[in-house]
Image: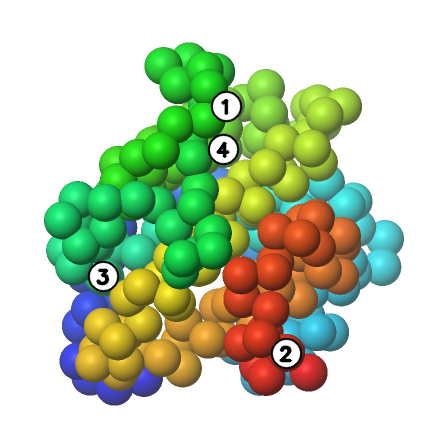
Amino acid sequence: MSIALKQVFNKDKTFRPKRKFEPGTQRFELHKRAQASLNSGVDLKAAVQLPSGEDLNDWVAVHVVDFFNRINLIYGTICEFCTDRTCPMMSGGPKYEYRWQDDLKYKKPTALPAPQYMNLLMDWIEVQINNEDIFPTSVGVPFPKNFLQICKKILCRLFRVFVHVYIHHFDRIIIMGAEAHVNTCYKHFYYFVTELNLIDRKELEPLKEMTARMCH
């Protein structure tokens, strides 16, 4: 990673503080194992596979929080170039428009400028992962029955951040020298969600051609 890029990413220029795992917990150990695999240069396809004897919900929880932190950071590096003027609609090129719905203020799918959509998205995910009823941190506390469904929705919405960044702001990523870093994060994300069938294939369509070149 270039010095300039390290400075960008080390600023922790995120929308939100990073969610961390408590040392000594099962999830912290899983997080360390997942990070060690990545840092060792292991094949990403192998790194996302559920380790033998581990709980699927724990494995998914660790990755959802990690992807939130990393994608949050990626968007944070280009957010000053993503404005209501440059991106009046949350989209992925001319064919794909994303509307926001949260059953609170926005009860129907609503077209919004990309920055507002991103803020609502990161807020919404942060609420989910900080909710002990959904992402329990205490040993022995079970996950809710609909845990994987919630995670599928989180991951589907995080994928839309990749779509917007790649299609509308990748020039800035290249200028910062962050292309390899973002591509690696995307490949890790893609292999994870496809290995565990956590995103509907039609949601992956906007980046289908790029993914075919990048993720063999």
Determine whether label 1 and label 4 are within 8 Å by CB: yes
Is label 2 or label 1 in front? 2
Residue name at image x 63 percent, y 31 percent: 150
Residue name at image x 35 percent, y 62 percent: 165
Residue to which mark 4 is pinned: 129
Residue to which mark 3 is pinned: 78
Residue name at image x 76 percent, y 52 percent: 197
Colour pattern of the rendering: rainbow
In the rendered image of this protein, does residue 192 appear above or below residue 112?
A: below
Residue to which mark 1 is pinned: 131
Residue to which mark 2 is pinned: 212
Count residues near mark 2 (Cα–Cα under 10 Å), then give few for <14, some for 14-19, many for 20+.
few
Q: Amino acid at mark 1?
A: Asn
Q: Amino acid at mark 3?
A: Ile
Is label 4 or label 2 in front? 2
Q: Residue 17 location, x and y as percent?
A: 29, 42
Ranked by sequence position, the earlier of labels 3 and 2 is: 3
As measured in the structure, the alpha-carbon distance from the residue carrying label 1 to the one carrying label 4 is 5 Å
Q: Residue 62 location, x and y as percent?
A: 59, 48
- The quadrant of the rendering that contains the N terminus is bottom left
Residue 216 seen by the camera: yes
Q: Quadrant of residue 173?
A: bottom left
Determine whether label 3 and label 1 are within 8 Å by CB: no
Q: Amino acid at mark 2?
A: Ala
Ranked by sequence position, the earlier of labels 2 and 1 is: 1
Residue name at image x 31 percent, y 72 percent: 170
Q: Amino acid at mark 4?
A: Ile
